[in-house]
Image: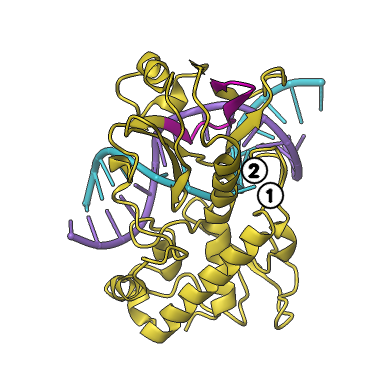
Chain colours: A yellow, B purple, C cyan
Amino acid sequence: MPELPEVEVVRLGLARQVVGSVVSAVAVLHDRPVRRFEAGPRAFEAELTGRRIEGARRRGKYLWLPLDDGNALLVHLGMSGQMLVREAQHPDERHLRVRVSMPEKELRFVDQRMFGGLLLSHGGAELPREIVHIARDPLDPEFDSDEFVSRVRRSRSGIKRQLLDQTKVSGVGNIYADESLWRARLHGQLPGEQISATALLQLLDCVREVMSEALGQGGTSFDALYVNVNGQSGQFDRSLRAYGRAGQPCARCGSLIRRVAFMNRSSFFCPSCQPLP
DNA sequence: ACTAGCACCTGATCGC
DNA sequence: TGCGATCAGGTGCTAG
């Protein structure tokens, strides 16, 4: 669910509200969200307890909190995960999975579908080993645009599939892929090897543009499943031009936006602005 | 090595 | 009112 702008909104909230705090207690209420931590839920609780949170960092859709022992609390929100900062007396959320207690507040991992999760990354303060395969994102100053372009042009896969491949570029999900392709006037099924380097660089600019605008609006929320650390929704859904707009006129040309099935989900595009050759 | 497809979950909504 | 099918913003594993 949450893509780069939504995760960045959460990261900013954590940076403001939990960095500098010391963890006084941890309760894993459902084992599934810590499934990737091999030492198990009890070790997760024990190792996180007593640690001071030193920062809040992000790569793509992953975020992590470096700890004072050199380890890191690594977080992925999956499709429905939330990181909420609540007062301790706030009633438990229906899908509360992990409670991290601190003086005067709690950091809560809430996740309906549990595709997301937490783990303790040993020595992961700088960059958790679990996410070294994740590429930098297009807003990272060290993102290598030329490397992305050459990799895309070496593949026959459709450009949308490649935009969603987090080892080529991270942070892009189904919404911002469709929005970026609409802005760049590219059909998602165009094979990468058929797209010029210039067009791909323009596509990257569109990705940066749409994500920056979304970040400025607090992200995209269709329902209460994506919210910031205080439980508030973002407003970028009002600015979407393709995603979720099947049957509505294209803002550029007036043709009706179409929806097609893709990778067990949906793609939205303008058949006039984004033709397949 | 690359690629496509599926598994992993819960819940809301829609048609019958 | 109930039931099954479908859909939802993601990632990792695995079989070709």
* The quadrant where residue A150 appears: bottom left
Give the image location of residue C10, x and y in percent: 48, 48
Q: Residue at x 67, y 24 (%)?
A: A93
Q: Residue furthest front?
A: A20
Query: Magenta segment range?
Result: A100-118
Mark 2 belongs to which subunit? A
Is label 2 in contact with label 1 (beta carbons under 8 Å)? yes
Residue A240 sits above or below residue A86 on the image: below
Q: Which residue is mark 1?
A: A221
Mark 1 secondary-structure assignment: loop
Does residue A274 show up? Answer: yes
Mark 2 secondary-structure assignment: loop
Q: Amino acid at mark 2?
A: Tyr
A169 on left or right of A8? left
Give the image location of residue A140, x and y in percent: 43, 63
Q: Residue at x 62, y 59 (%)?
A: A215
Q: Nearer the viewer, residue A85 or A275?
A: A85
A91 on left or right of A276? right
Q: Amino acid at mark 1?
A: Ser
In the picture, the disc for residue A174 is none
The first of marks 2 and 1 along the sequence is: 1
* The quadrant where residue A161 appears: bottom left
In the picture, the disc for residue A226 is 2
- Does A205 lie within the magenta span? no
Q: Are marks 2 and 1 on the same chain?
A: yes
